[in-house]
Image: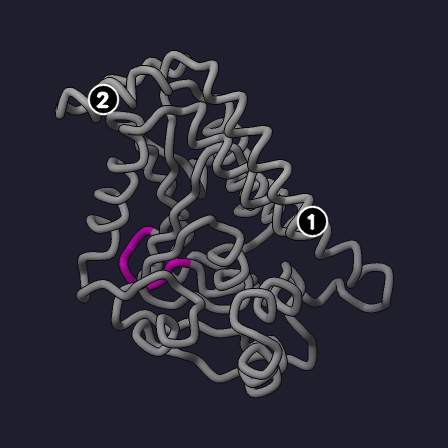
Amino acid sequence: MSEKKCSYSVNDGVAVMMVDNPPVNALSGPVLADIREAVENALADDAVRVVVFTGAGGKAFIAGADIKEFGVLVNRQTGSDFLKFGQEITHLIESADKPFIAAINGFCLGGGMEFAMACHIRLADEEAQIGLPEIKLGIIPGYGGTQRTPRFIGKGRALELILSGNFLNGRQAAEYGIVNRVVQAGMVLEEAVQLAQTIAAKSRMNIRAALRAVNQGLGMSLQEGMTLERDLFGELCESEDKNEGVAAFLEKRPARFSDR
């Protein structure tokens, strides 16, 4: 049996999920299948509290689709069907009840940028190359690039990237708002794991509630979102972790959350 092109290892609640498809971690059909399997396994794994998503080899996070597979895209139906699986995976990541942190190293292009945008938090190496070059191939982004990008950075900047196919380095991507912050060259995975460890130390139920409030609230009116926030806050007030968090603060000690 061939080795998986995406797998993860867990340490203290943090899973490092790594795409490993040399030389540039291109998204072939088998790679997408392995990513989906790894995501589903991590979500079902009680040992995993936070996922750091990155690319192996240092050269690329994900350098886009495997162009060799495009030969079968000969009409409207085959083109549309080709995108469904990748879109399903990005939705699975975005709607996950565990945080996904993208540690962007090297080339993060096309589907790579789209997978990174599906993550809840994005850190980028200052030397990373990030962009949506599909226009150069006579197509457009297909895993959410035309939808998430303008939602993140506004219509004008999104169209600049989509219509030009130009790349941004890590610092430019941070200025645009595509990534949360830029990290010194060679340090992005370490920084992402440190952030993941900070999050993993919190109550699992509180993390889930916060993710739900933000993810669902963005699709609601402000008033509806405020109601959702109020309801979730009320639910947490009945938890042991709320009592522990308040007690720890008052007693000036670290909280010992039990996820209850």
Callout 2: SS: loop
Q: Main secondary structure of the magenta part?
A: loop
Describe the colour scheme in one phrase.
one colour
* Contact, mark 2 vs mark 1 (Cβ under 8 Å): no
Q: Earlier in the sequence, mark 2 or mark 1?
A: 1
Residue 125 visible in the picture: yes
Tag of residue 84: none
User: Up-down: is 219 above or below 206?
Assistant: below
> Which amino acid type is shown beneath numbered disc 1?
Met
Give the residues in magenta.
56-61
Query: According to the image, label 1 marks what residue?
Result: 220
Residue for point 25% across, 25% down: 12
Does residue 154 appear left or right of residue 189 in this picture? Answer: right
Image height of 141 relative to 21, above or below: below
Queried whether the magenta region covers residue 58, the answer comes back as yes
Please, what secondary structure does the residue beneath circle 1 have? loop
For the point 46% across and 20% down, which residue is it?
237
60 to the left or right of 5:
left
Q: Position of residue 165 (x, y in %)?
A: 54, 82
Location of mark 2 (residue): 255
User: As rendered, which of 244 and 119 lies closer to the eye?
Assistant: 244
